Image: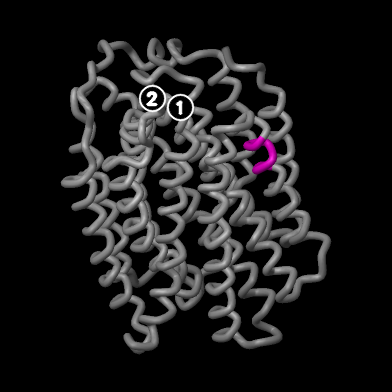
Amino acid sequence: MTKKWLNRTVLGIGLASLFSDWSHEMATSVLPTFLAGMGVAAAWLGFIEGCSDGLSSFAKMWSGYYTDKLPRRKPVAVLGYLVTALGTASFALATSAWHVLLARSTAWLGRGTRTPIRKALLAASVTKETYGRAFGFERMMDTLGAIVGPVSALALLPLLNHSYPALFIITLVPSLIAVGLIAFVVTEKQRIPVPHLSFSERIGLLPGNYRRFVIGAGVSGLGAFAHTMLILFATQQLTPVMGATKAAGIAVGLYVLHNVFYAAFAYLGGLLADRFPKKHLLAGGYLILTAMCLCCIVLPIGIYTLILIFILGGINVALEETLEDSLCAELVAEEHHGMAFGVLATVNGIGDLVSSIVVGALWSMYGTVAAFGYSAVLSMLGAMLIFSLPKNR
């Protein structure tokens, strides 16, 4: 008989992801406009996103390696959620771009610390046969928060007289609810810590198929820029026709649409992952990123093209995140899940750092054709590497 997958821990983690993403997506959805008000260009946005993701990735590596050796991981996760909450709210104190960089980096440091622990807790609470549904459900709930977040920002800003600092302070409400859910709803089953080994020895215990998988994910990640840059792309394309204020509002609305498809395809992708080869579905997710970038390059940019671009972006992130997590859990023994998720997250974070900075720099120096062309090539190569993975034994 199959163990019930939608248990207290899965539900608690899913709700925590919803409220936490609600919080930081309220801030993220207005971040390009907030920075534009400071006279900040695409290169700065890419630098902020890339540095924050890069720092987060190293926190994930440390957290995965260190917490596998602890009898209880959950207290570290609670601390990570709290740091993310306070870092996001501290945007309210920013008066220049480097203040935003510091606040975002602090928030993403907490986010990086909690991520491999959350994934390990989730994987430990279900069976191998239901990894896809559990991770898909968590991604779906996370993305529901990413839908509610921008909508909340759009609704609250007029009530706050377009005060961004006031909006950033309000992000504390959902983020502190997320902290409480992890602390009081999620349960951690008893586990035997792994023996103390050096970092290189722990890496050596991870199976070869997993390492090949991480290489493919890493190559694709080198081109997978932060999708907040799509908000900037839409704003720049629509401003000459509609004006800056209306263009910014439509861009945030498109980002909400992006997240609707992200939520829908996260669970659908997880459901399919429990029935079909995960590597094929993941490779397909990477190819959707290629298609999205090509749309940005070859199609005439109008509102309908932007709708298509944001839909493809949402589907890409949904399949990528759900399938990477469930495939990672499948390839590695449970006692090493923390390390495996940490390594994967670090590789992805380095990719985010490189891709966001490179895409932002190419965009500023040579235009969007060069920026999106770079991303398209690497995502296609990553798809080929994942598709060619040997069958897991």
Decide if residue 366 is on the left or right side of residue 118.
right
- Residue beneath the point at 57% across and 17% down: 209
Is residue 317 visible to the viewer in this orientation of the structure? yes
Give the SS element for disc 1.
helix
The extreme front residue here reads 1
Indicate the position of residue 159 as horizontal and vertical percent values.
34, 88
Return the mark for residue 337.
2
User: Which mark sits nearer the N-terminus, 2 or 1?
Assistant: 1
- The amino acid on which the numbered mark 1 sits, given as a three-letter code, is Ala
Q: Which residue corresponds to the image point at 29% horizontal and 23% vertical from the top-left?
A: 68
How far apart are the two marked residues, 2 and 1, measured between alpha carbons?
Answer: 7 Å
Say if 286 sits above or below 166 in the image: above
Placement of 311 over or under 236, stated as above or below: above
Q: Badge 1 local density, few (<14 within 10 Å), some, or many (20+)?
A: many
Whole-percent x and y of residue 392?
Answer: 59, 16
Point out which mark residue 147 bears: none
* Residue 110 vs residue 96, the one in the foreground: 110
Residue 173 as seen in the image, left or right of residue 23: left
Residue 284 lies in the magenta stretch: yes
Q: Which residue is mark 1?
A: 329
Identified by mark 2, the residue type is His
Magenta span covers which residues? Answer: 281-286
Q: Quadrant of the N terminus?
A: top left
Residue 277: x percent and y percent? 63, 29
The percent coordinates of residue 391 (x first, y second) are 64, 17
Residue name at image x 19 percent, y 52 percent: 180
